[in-house]
Amino acid sequence: MKTRKTPVMSGTEKRELAARIRTLDNAQGSHNAARNGGGLVEATTVDLRGKIPPLTTEEIAALTNGKTESVVIQPVNTQRAMLHLRGISPYCQHAFSQKAQAQMEATQRAGTQARSRKKREARDFEESYRAAQHISTEGWIGIPATGFRCAAIDTCRLVGFVMARAKLSLFIEEDGYDANDRTPLVKIIGEHFCHKGWARNANGTADLRWRPMWETWEVMLRVRWDGDQFSASDIFNLFSRAGLQVGVGEGRPSSPNSNGLGWGLWEMVR
């Protein structure tokens, strides 16, 4: 196997290279000065790509007048805290049921044939109510952790903090996962009941909804954040604002398709 030898520059070649680089720098400086003065000066550009062999540290320092810059990346300043949230308005949940997903898959697999075979089946409201719950692999019901994270990130727009930076700096640590689709969950404390109401579908028609609702509820929220972006007091105030202005779940004030019902709001328990 042949090894490639790195060409070595002689002292004369190095001095010539340094002189050519200074000539290019001077020409560029004159060009800029002329542009500022309103005139134009033509500068010759020399392509040195592939013609300059590797230089030593001393040679680089000599060519750059000893000016060097270093970039230092600090490790992530990870901070954690446990926040106690207590609901001040009902929380309503509506998980995307496995049955609805299976029906959607069957329709898409059937293609155009599904239109001719479409029939209206009897609706099991009790099953719809059970399917709307986020049940963990351990059997308890939880709230999607992303709901609280999105609420905090949405609140950033109210306090002038860049949301894109918050997305990379603020996280919720889950208590478990949904048994069906592995959605990260935060365990909810409280008793739920079946809320029977109505809502409008995407096509504008009214429809009945049976969903789980909690009149009183609490969560113990484990938050992880970048300490170089937020302080501990920032996190507390951010989630305090999110609980009063954004909310979580169905009917929250920040609902994308309506003005909400004032559901899913919380207060911070000190």
Image (tube, rainbow, N blue to C red):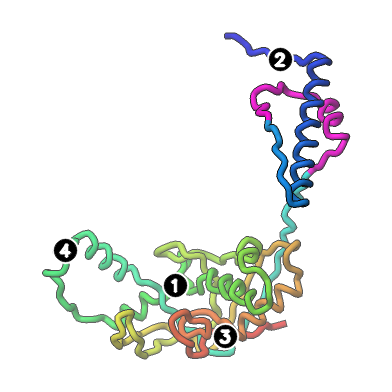
**Which numbered marker is on residue 265?**
3
Q: Amino acid at mark 4?
A: Thr
- Which quarter of the picture shows residue 226? bottom right
Q: Which of the two discs, 3 and 2, labels the residue nearer the N terminus?
A: 2
Residue placed furthest toward the left:
116
Q: Amino acid at mark 2?
A: Pro
**Is residue 192 in sight in this rendering?**
no
Q: Is 18 situated left or right of 190 in this image?
A: right
The residue under label 4 is: 112
N-terminal label among 2 and 4: 2
Rendering coords of residue 216 (x, y %): 54, 88
- For residue 63, what is the image quadrant? top right
Q: Quadrant of the N terminus?
A: top right
From the image, tell me which residue sits under label 2.
7
* Residue bearing the label numbered 1: 134
Say which of marks 2 and 4 sits in front.
2
Residue 65 within the magenta-colored segment of the rendering: yes
Task: Tell me the kind of residue under disc 1.
Answer: His
Q: Please, is residue 33 above or below residue 108 in the view?
A: above
Q: Is residue 165 magenta?
A: no
Badge 4 marks a residue whose secondary structure is: loop
Q: Earlier in the sequence, mark 3 or mark 4?
A: 4
Q: Relative to 98, does residue 245 appear above or below in the rendering?
A: below
**Residue at screen point 35% across, 89% down:** 198
Is disc 2 surrounded by few (<14), some (14 to 19) or many (20+) residues within 10 Å?
A: few
